[in-house]
Amino acid sequence: MDKQTSYRNGFVVLIIQHFLISSMYKRFDKNNAIALRGGRPLKLGRNDIPKLEEYWINHSELKKQLQFRRFELLYYQPDTNVGGGKSNIPTAPTEQEAIKLTQDELYNNLKRITESIDKVYHNLDDDSKFIIHARYFDTNVDCYEWEDIAHELTKMRQDDRVVSRNAVLRKRNKIMEDTAVRIGWVSVQAMLTS
C-alpha cells in the first residue's frame, strides 16, 4: 500500500468518525442536558408524570439517600493500598472531598432531584402547595383522590367559584413540568411549544 492510499484511508476514517460524533450530539446535547428528537427538544410524556410523582412522594427518602451517599463517599475509605507501603501522593482533604462529590453520578443525580423539588415547592402558590401536601406528602387517606383535593380547595376559597378535578390536574401537570425542567429532563423551549 502506498502513502497516498494510506492517507486517503485515514481521511475516510476521520470523516466517518466526524459523522458519527456529530450525529451523536444531534441526539443528545450534553451542555444543556436536553435530549433531542429530530432536532427538537423532548416534551414531557405521559409515562414521565408517574416517575416525577414518585420523586415527590419519596422526597424525604431521597434526601436520606443523598445524605447516606455523601457519608459513604466522604467517610468510608476502603483500603486501596493493599500490601503496599506508604502512599507518596500528597493529600489535600478539601479538594479530595470536592472531587469525590462532583464525580459521583448517583450523588449528583440525587442532589439535582432533591434540590429541584425544593426549589419548585418554594415557588408554588398556596393552592399548589395544598395539592402537593394532600397528594404526595400527607398520609391522610381522606383527601387523596383528585376529586377530594378539588373539593377541599373549593371549600378553602373565599369566593363561590368551584375548583374542578381538571383544574387540579392542570396545576399538577404544571408542577411536574417545572420539576422536569429543573431536573433537566426537558427544556423550557419544549414546554413553550407544547
Image (tube, grey):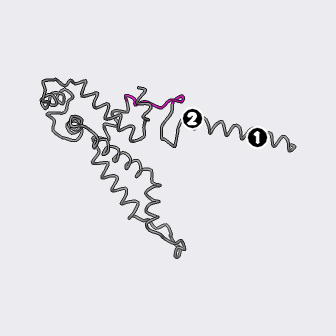
Q: Position of residue 160 (x, y in %)?
A: 12, 24
Image quadrant of residue 54? Answer: top left
Find residue 17 and report its horizontal and vertical position in percent.
67, 40
Judging by the rendered image, the residue that carries numbered circle 1 is: 11
Classified by dominant secondary structure, the portion drawn in magenta counts as loop
Residue farthest to the front?
Answer: 159
- What residue did someone put label 2 on? 26
Dot 1 crowding, Cα within 10 Å, few <14, some 14–19, many 20+: few
Q: What SS does tag 1 mark? A: helix
Q: Image check: 173 left or right of 6?
A: left
In the image, residue 171 above or below residue 106: above
**Residue 20 percent location from the top left of the image:** 63, 37
Q: Earlier in the sequence, mark 2 or mark 1?
A: 1
Inter-mark Cα distance, 2 to 1: 23 Å
Q: Residue at x 57, y 38 (%)?
A: 25
List the single residue furthest toward the right: 2
Q: Which residues are magenta?
A: 37-46
Q: Amino acid at mark 1?
A: Phe
